[in-house]
């Protein structure tokens, strides 16, 4: 399985603007409840934590439970007062971290 993040952040904004951020990561989010064709339990493998930082400061985070559908999507708002970089990270059960960054120019 190859998790691939997609993030939408405006490229520019005015100081003090509230922007909308959209994130989606491709992930099966296997709950550990289902069985394969042979009747074996498919092991649990979910993303259990999502976090967003801007210039090193926390903006948004969420703990994720097995009931979340595959390809978790988050949409949230943030106020920007300076140019910088948003860092997004998704943490899997096995400790794998999927991350990406997006820059924004604030005038």
Image (tube, rainbow, N blue to C red):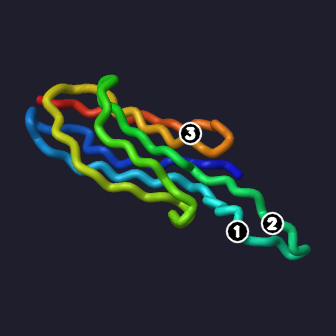
- The residue beneath circle 3 is 98
> Gap between marks 2 and 1, in whole Å?
7 Å
Residue denoted by label 1: 33
Q: N-terminal of the two: label 2 or label 1?
A: 1
Question: Which mark, residue 65?
Answer: none
In the picture provided, is 24 more to the left or to the right than 70? left
User: Which numbered disc, 3 or 2, marks the residue closer to the eye?
Assistant: 2
Residue at horizontal 30 percent and vertical 44 percent from the top: 9
Relative to 94, is 9 on the left or the right?
Answer: left
Left or right, 1 with respect to 49, comes to right
Q: Secondary structure at mark 1?
A: loop
Q: Nearer the viewer, mark 3 or mark 1?
A: 1
Where residue 63 appears, as percent x and y from the top left, is 45, 48
Marks 2/1 in contact by CB < 8 Å: the verdict is yes
Quarter holding residue 31: bottom right
Residue 12 placed where, x, y %?
Answer: 20, 38
Q: Which of the marked residues, 3 or 1, is nearer the chain's N terminus?
A: 1
The foreground one among 17 and 60 is 60
Q: Which mark is residue 41?
A: 2
């Amino acid at each position: 399985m190859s998790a691939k993040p997609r993030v939408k952040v405006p490229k520019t904004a005015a100081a003090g603007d509230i922007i909308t951020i959209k994130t989606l990561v491709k992930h099966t989010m296997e709950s550990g409840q289902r069985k394969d064709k042979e009747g074996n339990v498919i092991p649990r493998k979910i993303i259990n934590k999502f976090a967003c930082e801007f210039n090193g400061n926390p903006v948004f985070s969420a703990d994720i439970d097995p009931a979340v559908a595959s390809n978790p999507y988050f949409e949230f708002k943030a106020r920007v007062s300076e140019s910088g970089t948003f860092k997004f990270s998704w943490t899997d059960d096995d400790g794998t971290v999927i991350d990406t960054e997006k820059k924004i120019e604030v005038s």
